[in-house]
Image (spheres, rainbow, N blue to C red):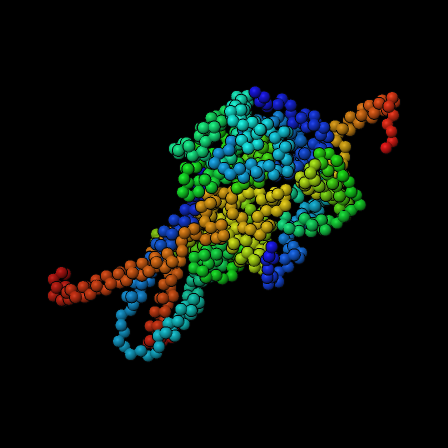
């Protein structure tokens, strides 16, 4: 009855391969389609260059403009908090950095664990706050779809299982770690087919916007 | 046999003092609490140092913190047990060894006198009988001073 | 047959017969508490229990194993092997250690089973070719391992699986498992099974479990893998003296870099400490001299199930077992092809729609109204 270790090895072995394959095929298919379809040719004479405004917009849109901030300060602040928290936990936790190094051979320094632990706890609280907000805000309530709740659940469970595994709150440990890896794999699998694709498309969309503005000679 | 040449390009202190792993301070605090209990209520405490996740040098560091006191004793029963008072009154190091001088376990005992030095109650109960027996035997066959 | 029955004397009587003083007994109990990973405050309880304890009869069965577990046991120094087999248990059958051989040896096993029916302990080291395997893969006195195990266990009080092979299948069960090796708990369902895993287990843990049974007359508290919590309750990682370096992000990157020499954390060199439960960090090896991590080598995770198949010993725990960047690139390339095809289809569809577009006239709209 060594089921839990077999489960962990399954998540680290065959299941990881399957998830990564679906993720890579799905993501590249979507990106290839976006780039190959491109935009309709614009025959109007350009007033200015496209590249610089396009690149600038990729960065400037990261900060919400004052109007957006006043209208939806909760979205901006809490959104920022959990996105940054998620990225720190994803990229700067030692085991995650090792995983990336093991897969791609690229390495970077990681943060001390207590820092990542605190950031993860804040991320979890912020994620719960976004759900409460979505369920109580009259407009958000009406525009939310099944996909929104699915994506929230998967992202939340990835962080939660990671937190539980780190603190060994689930026994035996292989189950805790295996659950975390499995949730991350589910995230990878649904990523190309849900709004999670924004991890990659946000920057493409911003570039297209900025480039279009630049061409027209308006502020980007 | 040809000697292997080894290049040492490291600045790390290989043979130097081992790193401090921060394991001594919690034990010193535990001893402090135990001393408070001993003074307030007379309750004795034993800490099993074998159960501590010590790294190289940690035990020596702890012993250096505790220092050496005036009393040294040894009990010869099932191998030696070495007792050393530390510089802190009431704090003892009790090193239990087997007949081959291998350490069975190492305790810190916070007590007026370590348990193993005191006569056991059952033995004490038999003390007078033991003395009487020896006196009776001494009447007929006086022991020779060695 | 000069086969010993379980002696009627209690341990206290037997030790006093050997001339052990009360101080000596107290010391014995202090060492026992330490060995069972119990706090020193338990010493009086242990003393009272041991004084009245009676030695259990033990039958030790060796199957598909390397004798490393027995080798480990012989290195126990508290109690020593002599103390163990003379005072703590009555070891009535053990291939390697017993003097008898051949039929006399097998007779000793059957006699001990008969004399101590329902009360003897069975210790198993090594995995067992399952009931569906070729019985000839491993035999003793012409009898298959499986048959001997089932026969011996039938009237046992409990079974102790010593070593990772007996506990979880171990090396013989590693992929592709040519002998169909199974663990004891895969096969023995109707008796309590205690797993003392490790390759080999720490000698003091083997003797500790036996002493626990002797002291308290019952089996110790177990974890989800049937391992005694007193020894397997905490991970190597949580008890590791190098843990502060892990928390501070200080890692050895290779076996001879500055970090390795300064004794930093070995996670990046493949240490399986975080997923491994064992007592190495406190009990250590070779009479408490050192243990793998203290000597600068990452933990292999030898006390966990499937540790042979759990990825490279020198790959960090979080690295997947089979995936490679090449495979990801291949999948990505396939994805790009799929995306290209989707683009072509979409463009073709747009063209068809444009080509077949039927402009709606005002008259047609008015007709519909």
Instruction: Name the image quarter holding the N terminus of chain A.
Output: top left
Asked which quadrant contains residue C342, the reply is bottom left
Q: Position of residue C105 (x, y in %)?
A: 53, 26
- Observer able to see residue C240: yes
Q: Nearer the viewer, residue B13 or C235?
A: B13
Q: Position of residue B55 (x, y in %)?
A: 63, 50
Identify which residue is drawn at 26% across, 76% down: A43
Asked which quadrant contains residue A114, the reply is bottom right
Identify which residue is drawn at 27% across, 74% down: A42
Asked which quadrant contains residue C346, the reply is bottom left
Is residue A74 shown above or below C213?
below
Q: Position of residue B18 (x, y in %)?
A: 65, 55
Identify which residue is drawn at 28% across, 62% down: C340
Q: Position of residue A20 (x, y in %)?
A: 38, 54
Is residue B37 shown above or below A63?
above
Q: Nearer the viewer, residue C175 or A174?
A: C175
């Amino acid at each position: 009855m060594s089921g839990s270790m077999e489960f962990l090895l399954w998540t680290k072995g065959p299941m990881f391969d399957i998830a990564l394959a679906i993720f890579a095929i799905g993501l590249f298919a979507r990106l290839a389609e976006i780039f190959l379809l491109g935009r309709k040719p614009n025959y109007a004479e350009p007033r200015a260059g496209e590249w610089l405004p396009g690149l600038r917009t990729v960065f400037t849109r990261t900060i919400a403009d004052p109007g957006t901030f006043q209208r939806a300060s909760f979205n901006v602040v809490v959104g920022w908090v959990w996105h940054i928290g998620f990225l720190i936990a994803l990229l700067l936790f030692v085991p995650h950095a090792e995983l990336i190094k093991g897969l791609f051979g690229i390495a970077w320094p990681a943060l001390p664990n207590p820092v990542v632990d605190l950031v993860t706890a804040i991320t979890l609280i912020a994620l719960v706050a976004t759900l409460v907000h979505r369920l109580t805000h009259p407009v958000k309530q009406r525009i939310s779809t099944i996909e929104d709740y699915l994506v929230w659940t998967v992202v939340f469970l990835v962080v939660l299982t990671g937190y539980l595994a780190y603190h060994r709150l689930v026994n035996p440990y292989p189950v805790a770690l295996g659950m975390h890896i499995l949730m991350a794999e589910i995230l990878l699998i649904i990523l190309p087919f849900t709004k999670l694709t924004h991890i990659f498309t946000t920057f493409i969309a911003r570039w297209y916007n900025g480039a279009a503005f630049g061409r027209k000679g308006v502020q980007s | 046999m040809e000697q292997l040449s080894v290049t040492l390009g490291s600045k790390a202190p290989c043979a130097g003092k081992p790193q401090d792993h921060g394991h001594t301070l919690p034990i010193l605090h535990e001893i402090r609490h135990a001393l408070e209990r001993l003074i307030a209520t007379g309750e004795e405490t034993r800490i099993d140092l074998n159960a501590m996740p010590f790294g190289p040098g940690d035990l020596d560091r702890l012993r250096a913190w505790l220092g050496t006191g005036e009393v040294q004793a040894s009990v010869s029963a099932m191998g030696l047990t070495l007792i050393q008072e530390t510089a802190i009154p009431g704090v003892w190091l009790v090193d239990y060894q087997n007949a081959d001088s291998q350490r069975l376990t190492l305790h810190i005992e916070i007590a007026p006198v370590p348990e193993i030095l005191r006569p056991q109650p059952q033995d004490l109960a038999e003390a007078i009988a033991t003395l009487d027996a020896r006196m009776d035997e001494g009447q007929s066959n006086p022991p020779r001073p060695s | 047959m000069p086969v010993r029955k379980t002696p009627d004397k209690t341990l206290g009587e037997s030790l006093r017969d050997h001339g052990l003083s009360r101080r000596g007994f107290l010391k014995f109990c202090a060492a026992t508490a330490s060995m069972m990973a119990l706090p020193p405050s338990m010493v009086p309880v242990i003393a009272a229990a041991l004084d009245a304890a009676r030695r259990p009869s033990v039958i030790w069965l060796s199957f598909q194993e390397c004798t490393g577990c027995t080798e480990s046991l012989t290195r126990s120094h508290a109690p020593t092997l002599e103390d163990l087999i003379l005072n703590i248990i009555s070891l009535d059958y053990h291939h390697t250690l017993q003097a008898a051989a051949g039929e006399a040896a097998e007779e000793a096993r059957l006699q001990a089973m008969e004399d101590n029916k329902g009360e003897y302990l069975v210790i198993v080291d090594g995995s067992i070719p399952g009931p569906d395997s070729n019985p000839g893969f491993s035999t003793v006195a012409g009898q298959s391992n499986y048959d001997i195990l089932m026969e011996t266990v039938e009237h046992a009080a409990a079974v102790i699986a010593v070593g990772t092979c007996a506990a979880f299948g171990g090396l013989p069960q590693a992929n592709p498992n040519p002998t169909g090796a199974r663990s004891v708990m895969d096969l023995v369902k109707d008796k309590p099974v205690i797993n003392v895993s490790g390759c080999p287990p720490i000698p003091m843990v083997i003797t500790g479990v036996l002493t626990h049974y002797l002291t308290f007359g019952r089996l110790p508290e177990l974890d989800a893998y049937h391992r005694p919590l007193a020894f397997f309750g905490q991970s190597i990682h949580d008890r590791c003296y190098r843990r502060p370096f892990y928390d501070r992000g200080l890692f050895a990157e290779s076996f001879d870099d500055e970090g390795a020499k300064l004794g930093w954390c070995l996670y990046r060199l493949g240490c399986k400490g975080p997923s491994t439960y064992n007592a190495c960090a406190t009990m250590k090896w070779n009479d408490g001299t050192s243990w793998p991590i203290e000597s600068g080598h990452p933990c292999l995770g030898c006390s966990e199930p499937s540790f042979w198949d759990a990825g490279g010993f020198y790959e960090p725990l979080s690295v997947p077992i089979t995936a490679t960047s090449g495979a990801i690139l291949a999948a990505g390339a396939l994805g790009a092809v799929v995306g290209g095809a989707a683009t072509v289809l979409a463009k073709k569809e747009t063209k068809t729609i444009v080509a077949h577009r039927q402009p709606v006239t005002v008259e047609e709209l008015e007709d519909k109204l």
